[in-house]
Amino acid sequence: MRKIGVLTSGGDSPGMNAAIRAVVRKAIFHNVEVYGIYYGYQGLISGDIRKLEIGSVGDIIHRGGTMLHSARCLDFKTEEGQLKGIEQLKKHGIEGLVVIGGDGSYRGAGALTKRGYPCIGVPGTIDNDIPGTDFTIGFDTALNTVIDAIDRIRDTATSHERTYVVEVMGRDAGDLALWAGLAGGAETILCPECDYNMEELIAKLIRGKERGKKHSIIIVAEGVGSAVDIAREIEAETHFDTRVTVLGHVQRGGSPSANDRVLASRLGAHAVELLIEGKGGRAVGLEKNQLVDYDIIEVLSHKHAIDRKMYDLSSELSI
Ligand code: F6P
């Protein structure tokens, strides 16, 4: 393999730049040329493709976002879009592609794989919802951003003796809510994967107040529904002074944590190793701190599961 391409797609995540850097430097180390495809699959279709050198990825390891930019591209879901993309790759002599992104990006890579084009998926999303890896790039940073926010909310919640409902991202997954709730000492965590009972939630809040608790924090994964609706219901039932914070895209930005930089560097480099070995159609990951790779189509057929024991533990610790 003499020339490879790299793109980032879907929602950006902190650490994507570190992954791009690893792909570029690892490839050049092995005398393979690298082409950056800008704006994800949109740029692949339109041919926004530029050669990257060692210096192109200098001074980015610590930066959030993605230097290649990103896009959500509906056209790439069509046969026409995919064929145009492959045509562009062939036109530039690019023999393999590294796709950094979440499940939508993986579906694009899966489509290219089915058309016989060698692709490697690198999991980059704050949602931590990609099967075949313990962690996705960006999750750790987003988690720390959420924790920082919860700690601040806790201060003001205590001062005013308020109940706070904090909505976090995660699309259909509850990992960010669960980890943030456990690390932030939340009273209750609502995840899309776990049923909850509003009466129990309210009874717990009242019990807490009765034993002298000065505040309560409830973490709601966006996949459960609106934090505003949940807060309204709590306030109506308890008459506690209740506030809502929707953290939103704040969770997607910022300098990547050391863990995300290391994860991104290892996964990006591993993706290049696979392409050099002539392997395509793989999704890389880290399991029990070991690099792994799986058939990307197979990975797409699995559903990421939440750690149920961790969820139960969070309830036990917040009695
Ligand atoms: O997948 C990452 C993510 O931030 C989700 O947590 C969220 O639901 C979604 O992207 C938001 O997408 P957009 O940035 O397109 O509004």
Image (cartoon, rainbow, N blue to C red):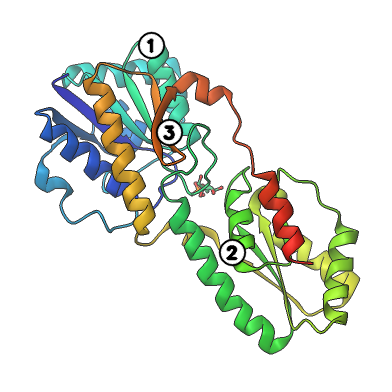
Q: Where does the N terminus fall, quadrant-wise?
A: top left
Q: Earlier in the sequence, mark 3 or mark 1?
A: 3
Name the side, left or right, on which 16 lies relative to 297. Answer: left
For the residues labelled 1 and 2, the Cα–Cα distance comes to 44 Å
Disc 1 is placed on an element classified as: loop
For the residues labelled 2 and 3, the Cα–Cα distance comes to 35 Å
Residue identifier under label 1: 115
Within 10 Å of disc 3 (Cα), the crowding (few <14, some 14-19, many 20+) is: some
Badge 1 amino acid:
Arg
Give whichever of 238, 260 is nearer the camera: 260
- The residue depicted at 32 percent of the width and 49 percent of the height is 262
For the residues labelled 3 and 1, the Cα–Cα distance comes to 18 Å
Q: Is residue 2 above or below residue 202?
A: above
Within 10 Å of disc 2 (Cα), the crowding (few <14, some 14-19, many 20+) is: some
Res 73 label: 3
Res 14 label: none
CB at disc 3 and ligand 1 closer than 8 Å: no
